Amino acid sequence: MTAKLDNAKALYLEGIEEGRAREAVERYTGDRYTQHSTGVRDGVEGFVEFFEPFIERNPRREIEVVRGWEDGRYVFLHAYQKLGGGAAEWVTTDFFDTDDENRIVEHWDVIQASSGPNASGHTQIDGATEITDLDRTEENKAIVRAMIEDCLMTGGTAQRITEFIAEEYVQHNPEVADGRDHFAALARKPDRELDYDEIVLCVGSGNFVATLCRANRAGSPLCQVDIFRLDGGLIVEHWDNTEPVGPEDEWVNSGKF
């Protein structure tokens, strides 16, 4: 692992799982810590005032970082959290920006409740984890960007899906089965409910690419994270997390994006 990835994981594991919120946030963040989790204020004190009560309320905390990588100044983590021995289970997807000393200066997240296997037997976190094809990082990021822009954004169509998605497409969305045909059915207009509005972040390493997007479902704003695994120029596996964007008057920072 590198210092950037180490620091992002340590903020999670030391600060939240081990319950050392102040020590971790002071050690692993930079001169600023801009926060986009809308219930958490910016800065060290915002992190502490949110997580110290969280730790007290949830004395049994288990966190597993399932996937993680860095891309230039950015880091991405895909994690599973279990509280109270399973009383609450969450899948979290986090993006971090870092400074020249590899310390965290900005954070975005999307959190979704963990659910059981989908129709194809896959959970929200199982599947491939090995990072390969490091020489294809930029190529794979471009493929993912093109797929979202051409097929999923407002005004896009599903006509080019076969150019981007493998026929034997492995799906980890709780409500969607494997296969390109299932994906295509969801993406086709006029029946498509989920539209993408903007790619805010695209962070990749080799065969894995994660995106943070502004999206909407029937006009209601969403913060959408998608994780793609690619092989031979096609997307072969997919995980995602979705979170509604709450009313602006409930934010304690500048918002989800």
Image (tube, rainbow, N blue to C red):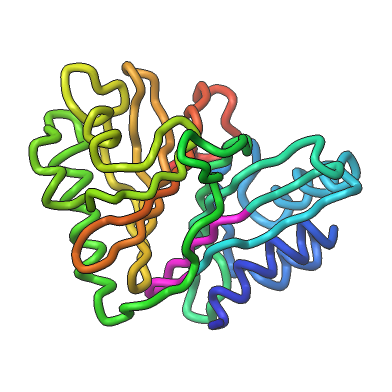
Q: Which residue lies at the image location 56% right of the left edge and 39% below the top edge?
A: 117
Q: Quarter holding the C terminus?
A: top left
In the picture, measured across the screen, residue 172 lies left or right of residue 209, that is: right
Q: Which residue lies at the image location 61% right of the left edge and 76% below the top edge?
A: 6
Residue in the foreground of this view, choosing between 187 and 197: 187
Picture coordinates of residue 127, whole percent (x, y): 50, 58
In the picture, measured across the screen, residue 39 lies left or right of residue 133, that is: right
Q: Quarter holding the N terminus?
A: bottom right
Picture coordinates of residue 8, whole percent (x, y): 60, 67
Q: Which residue lies at the image location 31% right of the left edge and 49% below the top edge?
A: 169
Q: Which residue lies at the image location 70% right of the left edge and 48% below the top edge?
A: 46
In the picture, measured across the screen, residue 11 lies left or right of residue 140, that is: right
Residue in the foreground of this view, choosing between 6 and 90: 90
How many badges with numbers are in the image?
0
Q: Is residue 155 above or below residue 73?
A: above
Residue in the foreground of this view, choosing between 168 and 203: 168
Q: Is residue 159 rendered magenta in the image? A: no
Picture coordinates of residue 215, whole percent (x, y): 33, 32
- The picture quadrant where one finds residue 39 is top right
In the picture, measured across the screen, residue 174 lies left or right of residue 138, that is: right
- The picture quadrant where one finds residue 210 is bottom left
Magenta segment range?
A: 69-79
